Image (cartoon, rainbow, N blue to C red):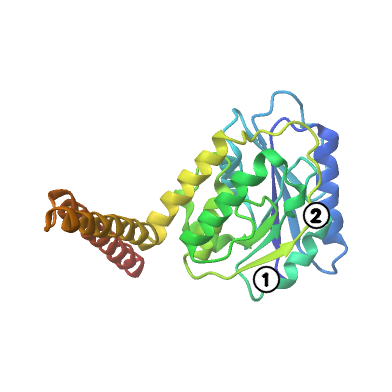
Amino acid sequence: MNAISILIPCYNEAPEILISTIESVKKSFENVQNQIFEIIVINDGSKKYEYSNISIEKVRFLEHIVNKGYGAALKTGIKHAQYDWIGITDADGTYPNADFNTFMAYTNDFDMVVGARPWNRISALRKFPKYLLTLFSSFLAGYKILDLNSGMRIFKKEMAMQFWSLYPNGFSFTSTITMGCVTNGYNLKYLPIEYSKRQGKSHIHPIKDTLRFFTLVSRLALYFNPLKVFMPLSIVFLAIAVGRGIRDYILVGSLGGMALVLFFMAFQVFFFGLLADIVIKNKRNIL
């Protein structure tokens, strides 16, 4: 039986909601015979509530003096985790934490198990940008991603440490580790889960954070699989160049300067991508 450390980042969540979250996680693992686990709550500089009087068996509290962000809280938790498997969930009561034990059944065959939230539970304001982001990330990763940034998942600590320098301090930790997992040959399993309405106020801005996610996914694709970015861009320039060349030939009987520039740009972008891909593969071999 694999031992696991469950991390719960917490920022200004009501104590009763946090305690309910902790108890649901404990209930999940206490129902499994001989399951070894610990729960680590990372108080990310909360000022609204005080958690020092909460004392629950098998639960440790870590403190950030100031608010550093969701990713920073998880990184602090991973550093202090005792066990080789890491689980994460939110403190706001949205995830079915009592189902965590079902994730553990897949630890022999997969490196990360993620709870995929149903689309009908996502607000209308966030559904369309999330859909576009999911399609975009799936294309860049070459893998069908069902939920890029689900906050309920378990993963090998060893795998998480490989991408340590890439994790931002903000909300993009889950997106980063998902892209890192699927673009580096690790095995990912999605399990459908229920998703409840958030208790309290969300700290995610639907427009600003969506733009950040798009930027992050593009940057990760360039880091892990640059040809997925450069190749389509090269094809676009080439198609425009061919169209411009046909137009020039029909009108003046020869290729114009703009068509030649576009052809040059298409090949230049392609070779930039090829060079980036070679550099990255060599770096992985060295490491």
**On the picture, is 119 further left or further right than 162?**
right
Q: Which mark is residue 107?
A: 1
At x 76% / y 33%, what residue is drawn? Answer: 13
Percent of width and height locating residue 215: 46, 44
Q: Tell how many labels.
A: 2
**On the picture, is 58 further left or further right than 208?**
right
- Residue bearing the label numbered 2: 194
Q: Is residue 83 visible?
A: no
Percent of width and height locating residue 88: 68, 52
**On the picture, is 8 further left or further right than 187?**
right
Q: Nearer the viewer, residue 106 or 37?
A: 106
At x 22% / y 59%, what residue is drawn? Answer: 246
Q: Nearer the viewer, residue 196 or 260?
A: 260
At x 53% / y 63%, what residue is drawn? Answer: 181
| Precedes in sequence: disc 2 or disc 1 | 1
Label 2, residues with CA under 10 Å away: few <14, some 14-19, many ≥20: few
Q: Secondary structure at mark 1?
A: loop
Percent of width and height locating residue 57: 83, 48
